[in-house]
Image (tube, coloured by chain):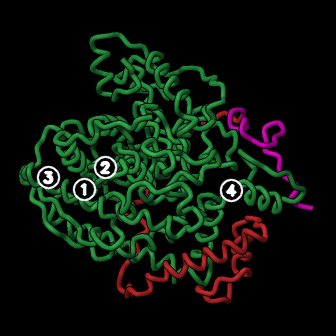
Amino acid sequence: MELNRLTAHQLLELIKVNSIESQEIISFLEKRIKEIDNKLNAYVRKDRTVDVKSEENTEGFLKGIPISIKDNICTKWLPTECCSKILEGFLPPYDATVIEKLKSYGAKIFPLKTNMDEFAFGSSTENSYFGPTHNPWNLECVAGGSSGGSAAAVASDEAIFALGTDTGGSIRQPASFCGVVGLKPTYGRVSRYGLIAFASSLDVIGPITKDVYDSALLLNIIAGYDPRDSTSVNIEVPDYLKALNLDIKGIKIGIPKEYFVEGLDKQVKESLDEAISVFKKLGAECREVYLPHTEYAVAVYYIIATAEASSNLARFDGIQYGYRIKQKNLISLYKKTRGQGFGQEAKRRIILGTFTLAHGYYEAYYLRALKVRTLIKNDFDEVFKEVDCLVTPTSPTPAFKIGEKIRDPLKMYLSDIFTISANLAGIPAISIPCGFTKNNLPIGLQILSSPFNEEMVLRVAYNFEQNTVWHKIKPKL
Amino acid sequence: MVKSKSNSITIKTVNYIANLARIELKEKELKIFVKQLKKIIDYINKLKELDVSDIPPSSHILKLKNVLREDNLKESLPIKEVLKNAPEKKENFFVVPKIIE
């Protein structure tokens, strides 16, 4: 049996009856990566010889099942470079909290990191210093981004499951483009300690998995309060797997009118309509709802996210780690190191963020954006008084061609139009497969719920998944 | 302060901002950025349609309070390990160019 094709929960079932060593699963993954990753580029630094002292316990709950980690989450003494030249060779001297937790549960941290847009700046993984990740369903298309490497690796059985990060859709959109499950938890549900920050009021770590069960299983492990992250929230973590046992009879699903407008691909719309009829068949009540400030979300996001990024990325200056261009003068060391160490999109965002925070512009842009953010959050608060969750397309289109949007940043930014609001409002959201286009590209649907109601999101997703076949179909590579 | 209007981003504005952000841009990059930023800023000006005078800002979505901890002595990362990543180091220090003449 090809162990790399299984989910974590399938492997756990198997391990109950057969003894499977962690190394056996890893060998299958390595073989698969060797076979196909020159086409996909889901992993980075594949030529690196791995020399890590195994300090993991493989006796814990996860029995040594390997998990793949995005390149912006700190893994002790394993390269963590945010796919940026400026962090070239960076070896974190500590583990992120999520990595500590995974290790304590007996997970094996897969030694190769997954590809991403540099510092998570992008929606296609084309902004990676290591080159783009290709979509497993069509190599000419993007895998989505910024967690494109994690999504492509999971979709193509180069990984059992993976962690991604989501600031404006970076887990959900690549999951949708690659036909896998991506969950963005509530802001504050999962510790950000050891996640290299992009936009601190929006960033969340979450699972990218082959099915909803694995998503719940992984969230059970990574969720929870962490005193080292002052924005992590100290409320009890439920057993998310329990939520999967419940049906969705009588659940009220809102369909936001603003998400079904011009620009929505016809095939995506048809697929969503079909999905809605599945929810109805399962006994859910579907009704139209309104999120009137949706059209402002992208503008708000690109002000707040770039402002926070410009401040967070000030630390990359060639002094303590990473790339440095030696100069006699400190200021020119900073300027040359940053000018040459950052890629185009990183520089563009730092400049845009610095601009909106600059004296004379702060009120017109940054402060105004924070106020509109309140309006967007209020829209959701209102709507969740009426319904239990929302169902929308994850992305207005299926995966686009590599190179199609890279020269037009605004066009690229607009591809996140359906995912951004969840980050601005901090709410949980999942993307699950719900069909394919005529050209055999996956389509994803998104389920959103109120803060800390991951149980609702997972429950509705699981009911849909178990009554459809989409998650079982794999790309031919 | 920059004098030019927001929707008339010039090479001078971008140069000024890049200097604040300590990023050296090539002439070619500057020109592309001016063009792209103009377009992006035109788009984000969309927010001006809304009257937000009575709306409070949300810098955060959680009801967060300042988190304080006990001031206890705790081990930090070993200096030797932290310095492993330094592009240039000497003994227990990061080496930087001379700052004070």
Label 3, label 2: how many angstroms apart (C-alpha)? Answer: 18 Å
Q: Which residue is the site of mark 3?
A: A279
Quarter holding the N terminus of chain A is top left
Looking at the image, can residue A113 be seen?
yes
Residue drawn 58% across the image and 32% down it: A76
Question: The chain drawn red is chain what?
Answer: B
Q: Which residue is the site of mark 1?
A: A271
From the viewer's perspective, is the residue at label 4 or at label 2 nearer?
A: 2
Q: Nearer the viewer, residue A393 or B52?
A: A393
- Tag 2: amino acid: Phe
Looking at the image, can residue A233 be seen?
no
Give whichever of discs 3 and 4 has the lower sequence position: 3
| Residues indicated by labels 3 and 2 sit on the same polypeptide chain | yes
The residue lying furthest to the right in this view is: B101
Q: Is residue A404 left or right of residue A77?
A: left
Which secondary structure, mark 2?
strand
Q: Nearer the viewer, residue B1 or A291?
A: A291
Give whichever of discs 3 and 2 has the lower sequence position: 3
Q: Where residue A302 sits in the image (x, y, percent)?
A: 50, 69
- Tag 4: amino acid: Phe
Label 3, residues with CA under 10 Å away: few <14, some 14-19, many ≥20: many
Label 4, label 1: how many angstroms apart (C-alpha)? Answer: 39 Å
